[in-house]
């Protein structure tokens, strides 16, 4: 009687079938694969502070529904559990006779710590898959990674190596447990979406919706051809790619976007805008590798710049923070952006920089409070990009400028000259 090589595949923030190296390896090397998704306590069962709200929760549940449909079409089913990975996964392994857990490597400290704890309890195989550049293809050791993005980008571009999207093996098998019921949003949240405006762009979770957005924005509307000129706009659905929610949950891989950029350039030619989308993917990679390099330092008060003097705090920090959250400051541009975030789970890149600068430099509030508020509310939250960007603006991160403060009044005059954005979100 032969022994069945049975393995668990733990889907984390890689909720896709296409270009999923860890998933492909699990299917290739195992006789039977058991797909699993965990509603981890550290994210879904935290209330003080809360770490996820209904906008991102809905997006993840939609993504899981899409993932289950894809796996079912391939002959398998997802297992859904809620709890701690180091408790749930060994129990599932024992229940189904699995001897290995495959997963995609995380980058932020909590994720890497979870992997370490799990590896002490069950044999794990982890593979890179979240970034455009593979860790092994960087032209420097991670410990020697440049602290400033420009140096990182130049070194990478001089030795550019981007791997092709990986393919699934032709033959594979699943152990097929009972088909899961994707829990409703009300299972996790009491509140519902508060959008009442008819022209707000909504995100639908899942790999299929990501593919549709990729096709629509790059090819049908050719939004990539003018991206550099439009990316700082505030209104509408097409001034930026808006790929970030699907990237954050891994419904879309950065390598897939890169291949589409190159295909578009071959057909329509390259320009500053097509390059700029690639440039933004490099920024994302930069923050991911910084997170892996600095570990818990990414989340500490002085971040990666321990020698920088701390800015003075105001005595009314708690009151100032509350007004900032609710869009009740003395700045109507900041308020408009914060109201958009609260009502939609989304804010433009231009808006994020302004509200972060205002909280840190005008209100004197600890940058970590703002980062945590974004963590709870953003539909496209990921720890590396979020905390990396907040550190960058605080002066405790990867920024050569000593004080990156935005003049929000001038920014409003330039990016919202007719006041339409402010009027819309401050009504």
Image: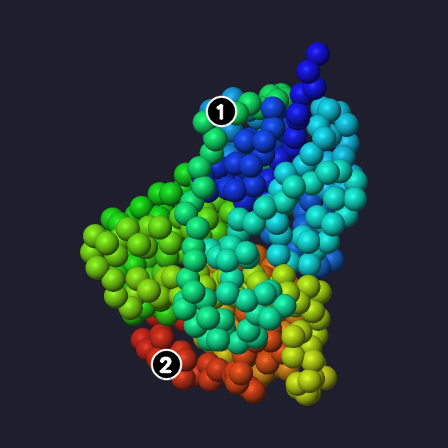
Residue 117 % position (x, y): 77, 48
Q: Is residue 196 left or right of residue 342?
A: left
Which residue is located at x 72 percent, y 46 percent? 41
Earlier sequence position, callout 1 versus callout 2: 1
Q: Is residue 91 left or right of residue 24?
A: right
Residue 374 falls in image quadrant: bottom right
Q: Crowding near pointer 2: few (<14 within 10 Å), some, many (20+)?
A: few
**Gap between marks 1 and 2 measured at Cα:** 59 Å
Which residue is located at x 71 percent, y 65 percent? 296
Q: Is residue 113 left or right of residue 245?
A: right
Residue 424 % position (x, y): 39, 65
Q: How many marks?
A: 2
Which residue is located at x 31 percent, y 54 percent? 262
Q: Crowding near pointer 1: few (<14 within 10 Å), some, many (20+)?
A: few
Q: Observer-nearest residue: 351 or 424?
A: 351
Say if residue 318 shows up in the picture: no
Dot 1 falls on a residue whose secondary structure is: loop
Say if residue 67 shows up in the picture: yes
* Rendered-image quadrant of the N terminus: top right
Residue 377 % position (x, y): 57, 58
Q: Is residue 384 left or right of residue 276?
A: right
- Color theme of the render: rainbow
Residue 127 % position (x, y): 59, 46
Q: Which mark is residue 290?
A: none
- Give the vertical position of 275 relative to 179 (above or below): below
Q: Which mark is residue 171?
A: 1
Which residue is located at x 69 percent, y 59 percent? 109
Mark closer to the observer (1, 2): 1
Q: Marks 2 and 1: in contact by CB < 8 Å? A: no
Q: Which mark is residue 413?
A: 2
């Amino acid at each position: 009687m032969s022994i069945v090589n049975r393995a668990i595949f733990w889907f984390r923030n890689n909720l896709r079938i296409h270009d999923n190296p860890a998933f492909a390896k699990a299917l290739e090397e195992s006789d039977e694969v058991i797909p699993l998704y965990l509603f981890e306590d550290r994210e879904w069962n935290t209330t003080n502070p809360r770490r996820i709200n209904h906008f991102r929760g809905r997006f993840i549940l939609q993504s899981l529904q899409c993932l289950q449909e894809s796996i079912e079409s391939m002959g398998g089913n997802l297992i859904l559990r809620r709890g701690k990975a180091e408790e749930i996964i060994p129990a599932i392994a024992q229940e189904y006779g699995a001897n290995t857990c495959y997963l995609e490597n995380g980058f932020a400290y909590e994720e890497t710590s979870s992997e370490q704890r799990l590896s002490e309890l069950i044999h794990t195989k982890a593979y890179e898959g979240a970034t455009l550049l593979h860790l092994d293809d960087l032209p420097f050791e991670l410990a020697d990674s440049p602290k400033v993005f420009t140096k990182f980008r130049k070194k990478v571009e001089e030795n550019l190596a981007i791997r092709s999207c990986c393919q699934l093996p032709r033959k594979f098998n699943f152990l097929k447990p009972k088909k899961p019921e994707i829990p409703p949003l009300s299972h996790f949240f009491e509140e519902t979406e508060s959008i009442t405006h008819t022209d707000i762009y909504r995100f639908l979770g899942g790999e299929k919706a990501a593919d549709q957005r990729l096709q629509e924005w790059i090819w049908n509307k050719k939004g990539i051809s003018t991206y550099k000129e439009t990316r700082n706009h505030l209104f509408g659905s097409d001034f930026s790619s808006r790929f970030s929610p699907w990237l954050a949950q891994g419904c879309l891989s950065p390598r897939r976007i890169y291949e589409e950029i190159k295909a578009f350039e071959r057909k329509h030619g390259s320009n500053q805008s097509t390059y700029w989308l690639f440039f933004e993917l490099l920024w994302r990679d930069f923050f991911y590798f910084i997170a892996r390099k600095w570990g818990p330092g990414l989340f500490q008060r002085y971040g990666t710049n321990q020698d920088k003097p701390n800015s003075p705090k105001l005595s009314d920090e708690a009151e100032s923070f509350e007004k900032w959250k609710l869009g009740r400051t003395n700045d109507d541009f900041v308020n408009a952006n914060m109201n958009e975030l609260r009502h939609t789970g989304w804010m433009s890149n231009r808006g994020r920089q302004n509200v972060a600068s205002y909280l840190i430099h005008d209100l004197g509030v600890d940058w970590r409070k703002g980062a945590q508020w974004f963590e709870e509310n953003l539909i496209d939250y990921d720890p590396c990009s979020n905390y990396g960007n907040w550190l960058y603006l605080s002066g405790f991160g990867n920024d050569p400028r000593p004080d990156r403060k935005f003049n929000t009044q001038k920014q409003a005059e330039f990016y919202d000259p007719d006041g339409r954005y402010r009027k819309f979100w401050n009504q």
